[in-house]
Amino acid sequence: MTPILGANQYGKAESRVVRIVRDTARHEIRDLNVSTSLRGDFAAAHITGDQSQVLPTDTQKNTAFAYAKIHGVDSIEDYAIALGGRLLEATPAADQAQVRVEEYAWDRLGDHSFVRRGGAVHTAVVTVTRAGVHVISGVRDLVVLNSTDSEFKGFLKDEFTTLAEADDRILATSLVARWRHTTAEGVDWAGVDWNASYADALDILLRTFAGTYSRALQETLYAMGTALLESRPDLAEVRFSAPNKHHFLVDFSGFGVGGLTNDGEVFIAADRPYGLIEAEVTRADAPPAGDAWLAVPGFC
Amino acid sequence: MTPILGANQYGKAESRVVRIVRDTARHEIRDLNVSTSLRGDFAAAHITGDQSQVLPTDTQKNTAFAYAKIHGVDSIEDYAIALGGRLLEATPAADQAQVRVEEYAWDRLGDHSFVRRGGAVHTAVVTVTRAGVHVISGVRDLVVLNSTDSEFKGFLKDEFTTLAEADDRILATSLVARWRHTTAEGVDWAGVDWNASYADALDILLRTFAGTYSRALQETLYAMGTALLESRPDLAEVRFSAPNKHHFLVDFSGFGVGGLTNDGEVFIAADRPYGLIEAEVTRADAPPAGDAWLAVPGFC
Amino acid sequence: MTPILGANQYGKAESRVVRIVRDTARHEIRDLNVSTSLRGDFAAAHITGDQSQVLPTDTQKNTAFAYAKIHGVDSIEDYAIALGGRLLEATPAADQAQVRVEEYAWDRLGDHSFVRRGGAVHTAVVTVTRAGVHVISGVRDLVVLNSTDSEFKGFLKDEFTTLAEADDRILATSLVARWRHTTAEGVDWAGVDWNASYADALDILLRTFAGTYSRALQETLYAMGTALLESRPDLAEVRFSAPNKHHFLVDFSGFGVGGLTNDGEVFIAADRPYGLIEAEVTRADAPPAGDAWLAVPGFC
Amino acid sequence: MTPILGANQYGKAESRVVRIVRDTARHEIRDLNVSTSLRGDFAAAHITGDQSQVLPTDTQKNTAFAYAKIHGVDSIEDYAIALGGRLLEATPAADQAQVRVEEYAWDRLGDHSFVRRGGAVHTAVVTVTRAGVHVISGVRDLVVLNSTDSEFKGFLKDEFTTLAEADDRILATSLVARWRHTTAEGVDWAGVDWNASYADALDILLRTFAGTYSRALQETLYAMGTALLESRPDLAEVRFSAPNKHHFLVDFSGFGVGGLTNDGEVFIAADRPYGLIEAEVTRADAPPAGDAWLAVPGFC
């Protein structure tokens, strides 16, 4: 029996790169969490311990910091493309570099003062291969809630079903979404305004969530995905991972208080368990994804 | 040897109370995390297992949800005063009820749609006694950063000191602050606009952080505390717990790239260890705190 | 442009199922975290909001609790196979049920008293299809450390490389590993002693980690995977996700203390960034994995 | 109005000190999380920004690492006493040094190989003053469960009470406990076997938890505290913070399965809200605590 080395990748995860632009008295800040992985022919490192083809993860980290200066961080997508390209160039044995970036937003307090915004985090997963580049943008921790216009009924029932049908419930989720940019021959990545693209996508997702009457979280997600693809022809597909953050109506009926009712006004926000709805919406003529989604954590 | 029961308290922690106000088509949301503790003569419950004077923690939870409807949540301070008063009234053996509330802010997307804001969390610790009420308001997770106008030098040195003096560094913290409202005879708590008070305090803290040249985080905290007390005569004291979120300048000197320098532009945001600066600023003539700070977690 | 619904799945995540076996005065405890997902033709739920083919996630949760009694929990693998089979049976539109289970170990204090062990968590991912069953067992949070017999040198260098070669360093990781059981026609899953299989696999991993001189974490992982496959012919492949938990030697050279040296004795355990090494070792003649690994979070 | 600087302290939190003893081929490991705080006259640092009396938190961190070698880590209590003494000596303006240490336990796999045990964490809070030393030992994350011999009934009821009385329930908690060692004149701290003391205390707590019929968590805590003080005359008092980790019996009555019952066999482990029971048991003639508990996070 000879075991075989299968898929493998290695890199440095979660370098917390903070870039201050201080060319004028009015500073700018970009606050990133950067992870890189190299893939390719690293069999020797695994089987004989020969590291001669292995660019250390420490070097990958150094490069991530250096490129925040050398290339700069106009957008996380643009920075990731440059960083991935550099790592691939520096590592002959690699055939792919995946760069994953999260960006934490800050609001301005003054010329050199900032307060962290919190809330949704902008994400990017860029895969640079010898043949081209895949770019996936996304968002996580986008917590949204509709306090009405949500129902859940007419569902399949078996002997373990005790859930009552709901005509009017809270719908809430902490959304993870990722959308893949079209990879076509001749695409000039350098011309893309990634920040504008992200802001527009986020706006479409939020407006569709707010404006959609929901018969299930599945329907809402599909509507969001459809709206995104219809508005942005530069996107090939979108994936969602959406925990159903249950808000249960609190039962006041046992309280000995005359006239006390709970007409959709007081809820308990539950932690676990939670529904978990995951779905992909794709364009019929989307170019193939290749390895764009390889080793992306979870459904998306 | 007879052991003695010392200080004790019991209650229900972290009830996630969500209140939707739906009197009109334009809904409002208040999203709270509520914890209550009762203190008093509960020796029998501990020593003989007699529960006859113990209002169950489950009942405390029920009351927290019911009061979100019965009393409502105009502000977390106001709600906590009402809830604490009720729990004390319902429990003859108790002499104090402490109510701790956190509020998570949401931004509006539509008439009944919201997106969670993230960032700073508004907090309150209210202690209702048979003699009166203590109110402490506060904030946590207020992450602020100055990218210049911060130094640290002239410090005490011993044989373990290796830190270089810094003329220009990043100053950043994830602030916890709490401020005690004056408890004077004749104070009419019902007349206070708690939300306006909180917004004003937060604004003072942010503006002072941004506007203060810092020779140490201690100096910045003291300036913030002083500004708050000077602006708001209704506050008796303020306490801070401020982790120094270190941003270390990345050393580019070892990189073999001609002309590459790091002039305060690229930093690594470190996790642990971190400096931890804690301080209280108080008004000279502040009325006594009594048990206002009893069992508040940590320094503040 | 007509968007198309792509891959999708839905279910209930993180039901915390605790099973007490109390047939005798000497109780047993099984403490589980159970997640289920159904896959299949659920287009109507997404596109028109028709839920008639959707078994609610609430029902999936109920079934998870009921099956802890009806089927019992001899092992998490056996329980997951039964639960997945039931969910598939109850949902005509589904063609796959994935059941993910984690088990938290407890040590016995008395006949009905237990203390939670902490440390490594036993995991299982079972995928039940209309054609058969895939079983992946695994472990997470297995934190191991070698205080010597680890080096890292001879690596690829570029202009961003500043790492010194190391002859003797700490090697530590918090291992996630998953191994796929052979799916062959005629496999009688009912006859497998899953708990014994897990205990043996864990023992092989630990002994190999401790007994392997390491020229890189990659080499150690490959040795562990090889040992596992060589010892257990019932396994087809194993996957590892291994953060390199860096322990940096603390530099004492700047301290003004005569004769003070740090000869591999005092380290700082770092949080972020961390190396992340991921690899698969497979048997050359392994039967195909099919959808066994579909939507398993991360590399493994 | 002149604001006054009140209580204050500063230091370095969460230095992750790992000490390998490698005098022989059979290595030993001590894995610590160390936090220090200095208190005293640091008004100038706050008010005028004068740092001349401030020993940097960076130096405190360096000292924590150096003392793992210079003094060694026979026990975390002993190490903390030495470290606190050193910091006080190095800082004339300080009158107290508080050192907080957590220790993570490892099990041996081989001469230089270890696997982290998980579970309970040994803690110490040592306060060194110019007049003497306070030592508090403790444990956190001690998760214990009794599957019977626990009831809760006869409690106070009001109009919000809906809880049913329970004759037989699961009792579970994730215990935080701290116990103060007697500070008497002439106590020779150097002669204490802290590790043996901790092991004995932990054993008493576990045996008492397992052996006590419980009419409420309060009664169980009091029994544990009493047992500890009765067995160990060197302890002055003990404090507990005990979340009541609710395990709710799952209701099978709505399931359409003939004969299916849940006789205390299947529970859901709930996250939030949770009961929180906190109590202190003290010796009647305990010497005064002084500042031993100052700024200990939470109730204990």
Image: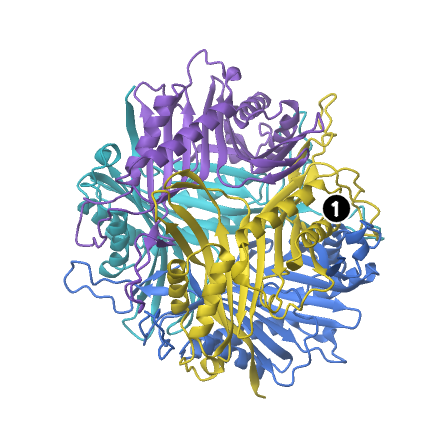
Chain colours: A purple, B yellow, C cyan, D blue
Q: Where on the picture, by quarter, is residue C74? A: bottom left
Q: Depth check: give the residue in front, A292 or A230.
A: A230
Residue at point 65%, 23% (across, down): A70
Describe residue B181's horizontal placement relative to residue C237 as left or right. Answer: right
Could you tell me which quadrant the N terminus of chain C lies in?
top left
Q: Nearer the viewer, residue A116 or D256?
A: A116
x%, y% of residue A219? 28, 36
At x 46%, y 83%, the residue is: B44
Image position, residue A135 (x, y; %): 46, 24
What residue do we see at 49% from left, 26% from top? A126
Q: Position of residue C94 (x, y in %)?
A: 22, 39
Q: Is residue C238 above or below residue C21?
A: above
Left or right: D249, with D109 as reference point: left
Residue B169 figure quarter: top right
Residue projecting furthest to the top: A186
Q: What's the residue type where badge 1 is placed? A: Asp
Q: How many marks?
A: 1
Pinpoint the chain carrying mark 1: C
Report the side of B108 relative to A106 (left or right).
Answer: left
Q: Secondary structure at mark 1?
A: loop
Of residues D35 and C234, the one nearer the viewer is D35
In this view, which residue lies farthest toward the left?
D258
- Observer able to see residue D246: no
* Extreme-bottom residue of the structure: B1
Q: Position of residue C41 (x, y in %)?
A: 22, 35
Judge whether residue C92 can be spotted in this image: yes
Residue named by callout 1: C251
Along the line of sight, the residue nearer the viewer: A90 or C233: A90
**Mark 1: few/some/many CA within 10 Å (<14, 14-19, 20+):** some
In the rendered view, would you say B206 is above or below D23? above
Which quarter of the rendered picture does the C terminus of chain C lie within?
Answer: top left
